[in-house]
Image: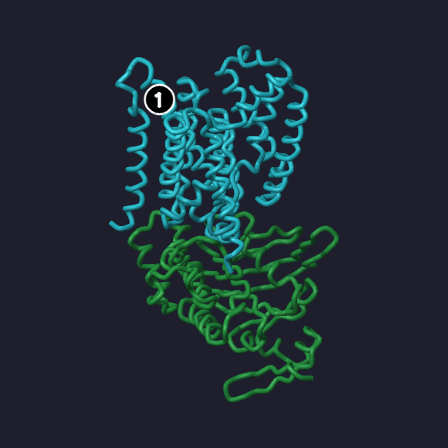
Chain colours: A green, B cyan
Amino acid sequence: MITVHNLHKAYGSKTVLRGVDARFAGQRLTSLIGPNGAGKTTLLMMIARLMQPCAGTVCLEGRTVAGIPVGEYARRVATLRQSPDFNLRLTVQELVAFGRFPYSRGALTREDHQVIDEAIAFLSLQPLRHAYLDELSGGQRQMAFLAMTIAQQTDYLLLDEPLNNLDIKHAVQIMRALRRLCDEHGRTVVLVVHDINFAASYSDHIVAMKAGAVQCAGSVDEVITEAQLGELYGLDFDISQGPRGRLCNYFNP
Amino acid sequence: MRRLQPRLAVWGTVTLLALVFVFLGAGMDVEYVIPRRLTRLGAMVIGGVCIAWSSITFQTLTGNRILTPAIMGYEAVYLLLQALLVLLLGTSSVVLLGIHGNFLLSVVVMLVYSWGIHRWLFRDGNSNVYTLLLVGLVLTLVIGTFTQFVQLKVSPGEFSVLQSFSLASFNRVQPPQLLYGALVVAAVALVGRKSLATLDVLSLGRDQAISLGVDYRHSVRLHLALIAALVAVSTSLLGPTAFMGIFVANSTYALARTFRHRVTLALGSAVAIGLFIAAQLLVEHVFNYTTTVGILINLLCGGYFLVLMVRTRGAP
């Protein structure tokens, strides 16, 4: 379980987070939702230790993360930011192999190769194994990066808008893969997501943020209500319960 | 085996060039000509390794393929030092300090400069490489202006001495300097060798590197320090080389077809050494010393830099 307590972050006079308290249950999939500028990504980056809070603490299973060495943390928590663009020419397999760096520091063992194979197989990326990243579509590239994160074999996965710029098919593939990681492998997944319907369909818990603070948090049933979402986004929501789950309609007033 | 070929070809070419350079028209004169040429060859090897290593790791740290460590102002500091020496001591400074004195003083001044800006920039946990670049660029401009101001104060004769310092050349090099240079390069290689895999991870960018368990701040500081040492050696030995690092790094990426520093650093050194030898051969045997290595290399690498800029812009 990850807990954050009284987290503050400000850039000069602009406050991004004002006293955030939240809990992310172990072996569950938690979505962070909320309007742009609510501080979702900032919160996630602080849990990932990519940003330092001005005040407050982040605890991983009761231990403050600031006290955990960065090398050890990489074997507990893996982070995937929005599809990073770099001009490296490397294949899917080479990228996934980077996921083993926290363990082997670059010299891959037989076990590492096995884990890499499993991660690639988990996302059915075998046909793209030797393809170069810059020749892939955005969705395929995102899958490759996710495979690297999976190969890191951490109990916790943090993802910042993994569905950004993906078509609906790839988005469903990614979300199903995350769900399976959670259910079959007992991993804890925390992700920032903008699509309410994806969050409602695949999450166990939802943390809704607005203006640098947690507005409400709880199970999907508790958070995905017309009243809560209407207040969160300032839009008129209509939530219908169909045979295949909940559907939030906010497109027309 | 197909992947090995470009590397073998590059090393083969370099060896061939080196043999031609040492023996062409030497008449087996082992008393004077060949030892002198070996000294210059040694300077090219050390300079080549310094330039390739510093440029490639610098581009990895900054995630940018059109930068060289020159943007941090090391060469500007070197030129200002030379200008000040000439201004204060006159042309006799060359005699007064001796060629070794000047070499060692230059190395020390550049190291102190880089230590100062790294220390100042990383003082409060800040680890933003872009701030470093910006400060480096501004300092380069400021120091360059000072140098110009000093140049206006010196006499035309002193100015021509100064001018000779501002272009790369192998003719100033003395064997003892090679020894100091080789020692520094060996020390850097020993320290850097352990973190080649970390460098590979750093090329994924800051966030991904931290997420994969790299102590980013520590690694960046370590590699910037190594770069500073290498640039100090190559600049004091040969003079400023400006665009050469960009050319060397980019042609290495194209030849190596891998991001692994284990490969690119070695291959890059070969490319840089080959380029130096080819330029020196041209100067000695084609242009009959009417031009200098520095000018030839700046011409080639500057031209390549322009092509790179135009092509990058044209790309979608």
For the point 61% across and 54% down, which residue is it? A57
Assess disc 1: are there few (<14), some (14-19) or many (≥20) residues with their C-alpha within 10 Å of its C-alpha.
some
Q: Which residue is mark 1?
A: B37
**Dot 1 amino acid type:** Arg
- Residue farthest toward the bottom in the current orientation of the protein: A243
- Residue farthest toward the left in the current orientation of the protein: B1
For the point 33% across and 66% down, which residue is it? A126
Q: Position of residue A245 (x, y in %)?
A: 52, 84
Q: Chain of mark 1?
A: B
Q: Is B305 in front, or is A19?
A: B305
Answer left or right for B155 relative to B166.
right
Q: As displayed, is residue B106 above or below residue A175?
A: above
Q: Is A83 in front, or is B54?
A: B54
Q: How many marks?
A: 1
Q: Position of residue A16 (x, y in %)?
A: 68, 58
Q: Is A36 in front, or is B156?
A: B156
Q: Is A205 in front, or is B158?
A: B158
Q: Is residue A154 visible?
A: yes
Instruction: Name the quadrant containing residue A209.
Output: bottom right
Assign a secondary structure to mark 1: helix
Q: Position of residue B227 (x, y in %)?
A: 49, 35
Q: As displayed, is residue A152 above or below residue B190?
A: below
Q: As displayed, is residue B32 above or below residue B15?
A: above
Q: Position of residue B305 (x, y in %)?
A: 50, 44
Answer left or right for A56 relative to B78.
right
Instruction: Name the quadrant containing residue A238.
Output: bottom right
Q: Is residue B186 visible?
A: no
For the point 39% across and 48% down, which residue is it? B254
